[in-house]
Image (spheres, rainbow, N blue to C red):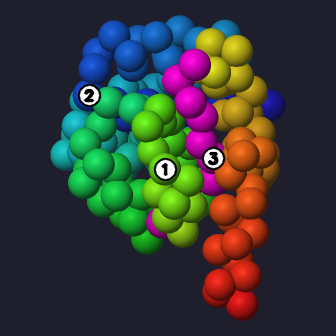
Amino acid sequence: MPTLKALIIDDKTEFRASCGQLLRKDLEILVTDCDGCSALESLKVVLPDVVVMGINIEEQQRWQLLKLVQLRWPTCQVLTLSDNQSDDDKVKQIEASAVGFMNSEDLERLLAKAVKKINQGEAWVPRKLVPSLVERLRVLA
């Protein structure tokens, strides 16, 4: 079975290291980046299966990266980590290309599982977000 390639994007070295340690048991972590500029270059070189977008990245960079991943690397799956985002922001990130969300309090327990499931084509969405997603679909219909 081929090794899963994951790219962690976050502005804090300690946070990237922590996520890397959590995933290293099950996944090959090829690159970690600190900002949007180096993240773009790493995406081009690494071609990860899954991107883990950390909580310590500027909002504007987050939105730019989500849109670029959708356009340039449509097979790459994105899991965004957040603590203070509204449900509306999370739904908008799904529209932009994210397939999963996780609060930082769940990282230790669920990060590796979420990345595996996302790579297998599943979404990783908290149950509390499902009503917002359903409402958005109703509006679009």
Instruction: Tell me which label, 2 or 1, sits earlier in the chain.
Output: 2
Residue numbers of the magenta segment: 96-105
Q: Amino acid at mark 2?
A: Asp
Read off the residue under disc 3. 100
Image check: 105 left or right of 65?
Answer: right
Q: Secondary structure at mark 3?
A: strand
The residue that label 1 is drawn on is 86
Q: Quadrant of the C terminus?
A: bottom right
Residue 85, position in %: x, y?
45, 45
Which residue does the image show at 77% across and 39% down from the upper left?
117
Which residue type carries mark 1?
Ser
Image-quadrant location for residue 95 = bottom right
Density class for disc 2 (Cα within 10 Å; few <14, some 14-19, many ≥20) is some
Disc 2 to disc 1, how far (Cα)? 21 Å
Placement of the N terminus among the 4 image quadrants: top right
Question: Who's the residue at 26% across and 28% down the image?
Answer: 11
Please state which of residues 81 and 72 is positioned toward the viewer in this rendering. Answer: 81
